[in-house]
Image: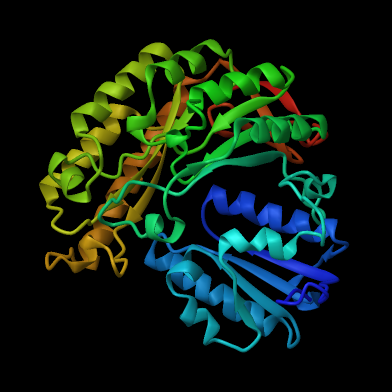
Amino acid sequence: MVSDSSSDRAKTFHVVNLGCKVNRVESDDFAAALLARGGEAVDAARADLIVVNTCTVTGEAEKKTRKAVRGALRANDHARVIVTGCAAAISPEVFEGMDPRVQVVPKGSMMGLLAPEGSSFEPHGAAPLLRVGDEFPTRVGIKVQDGCDNACTYCIVHVARGRAWSRPADEIVSEAVRLAQAGVREIVLTGINLGSYSFEGMTLAGLLRRLLDAVEDDVRFRISSVEPRDVHDDLIELMAQADGRICRHLHLPLQSGSPKVLKEMARPYKASYFVELVDRLYEAMPMLSLSTDVIVGFPGETEEDFQETAAMAERCRFSKMHIFRYSMREGTPAARRADQVDPVVKADRAKRLEAIAQALREADRSRRAGTVELALVETNGVATTESYHEVRVAEDAPVGELMEFRL
């Protein structure tokens, strides 16, 4: 099993992933490193080593993280449990106190600990990553950026992840080429604050241009969550002209449609700016699919504030909404406020907004009726379209392939 001694080898391992798409990429890298050193991916009950990649974005995520670590400890009585990720960075003593078998490892130290001794292991460099156990990841993420220089008043992630930094473009392009050659047909660019990507003057749009030039036309790219202030004209133009090689889908976090709440959240844009950006996006790409994140029940949020958020959602015609009830995170300015919203009120607002979100998703699906999109076959008989809708396809459609689908 893995420990502070490099001679201590894990023959069997299990990786538990919690949280965002960036965590998913990192967890896949951990698995790839362990496979490259001769390890075998097994279920938790048979593992010598269990890695838990944690999340702390909400109170519920924190609870799931602690439950996952306790579950790993109960899975068998001999596995060493490595706990890493955001929750471990914020509260290492919580996890270290659970059991002597728990070892908290900072995210930045994980690859040095897990990679084959004497190797220069690169993420996704090992072909075994493409098949861990029986799961073939048809959509593979590449982490191009980490950290965040913003400080939204409700968020603790910038503390856990640290300052923003970007990977060298050459590394990213090389990784994308290897994945394409291995058969991956959709590559997702991920980051904690993806739109802030900047390496030697290259922006996210510049990176995408390089990727389009380097990778064959039968591979498409998808941009994961990107902040409104980071969606510039060059990115919009590139997406509009890429003919679907960059999915015409953006996840654009709104968080609130209330100008007052946005200011108190310290979000770096106004509600009017968000609307203007959405209008520009739809003008450039009329069939754009636009998803978002919204927080209900932020401290001091009134019914009027909530109604502004609901109206904004309908105005922007979101195709999908991730709705979160505000969760107090110790150490953030919002958690210290005395005007916390009653949990019953938060639940009611979430329920009402979820009904709006469902209606908007159905409307987005309906407006695409009769159009043709490329769909990525995920499992037998199920595929995901460019606009991020799940569709049924033939049971014998090859998993991992892109195929035309009429909605």
Q: In this view, does 93 lie above or below 32?
A: below
Q: Residue at x 28, y 51 (%)?
A: 152
Q: In which quarter of the image is the N terminus?
A: bottom right
From the viewer's perspective, is 239 left or right of 5? left
Can you give x and y, in whole percent of width and height, for residue 337 in the image? Answer: 15, 65
Query: Relative to the observer, which residue lies in front, 83 or 346?
Result: 83
Q: Residue 131: in sight, yes or no?
A: yes
Can you give x and y, in whole percent of width and height, for residue 60 in the image? Answer: 42, 67
Query: Relative to the observer, which residue lies in front, 373 or 24?
Result: 24
Q: Quarter of the image holding residue 401?
A: top right
Q: Is residue 113 above or below residue 287?
A: below
Can you give x and y, in whole percent of width and height, for residue 334 in the image? Answer: 21, 61
Q: Is residue 279 above or below residue 353?
A: above
Q: Which residue is drawn at 63% across and 41% down?
A: 141
From the viewer's perspective, is 260 left or right of 64? left
Q: Quarter of the image holding residue 355?
A: top left
The figure's colour scheme reads rainbow
Q: In this view, does 153 lie above or below 263?
A: below
Q: Residue at x 50, y 25 (%)?
A: 202
From the viewer's perspective, is 405 left or right of 198? right
Q: Residue at x 74, y 63 (%)?
A: 114
Q: Residue 17: in sight, yes or no?
A: no
Q: In which quarter of the image is the C terminus?
A: top right
Can you give x and y, in whole percent of width and height, for residue 236 in the image? Answer: 43, 18
Find the residue positioned furthest to the right. Answer: 38
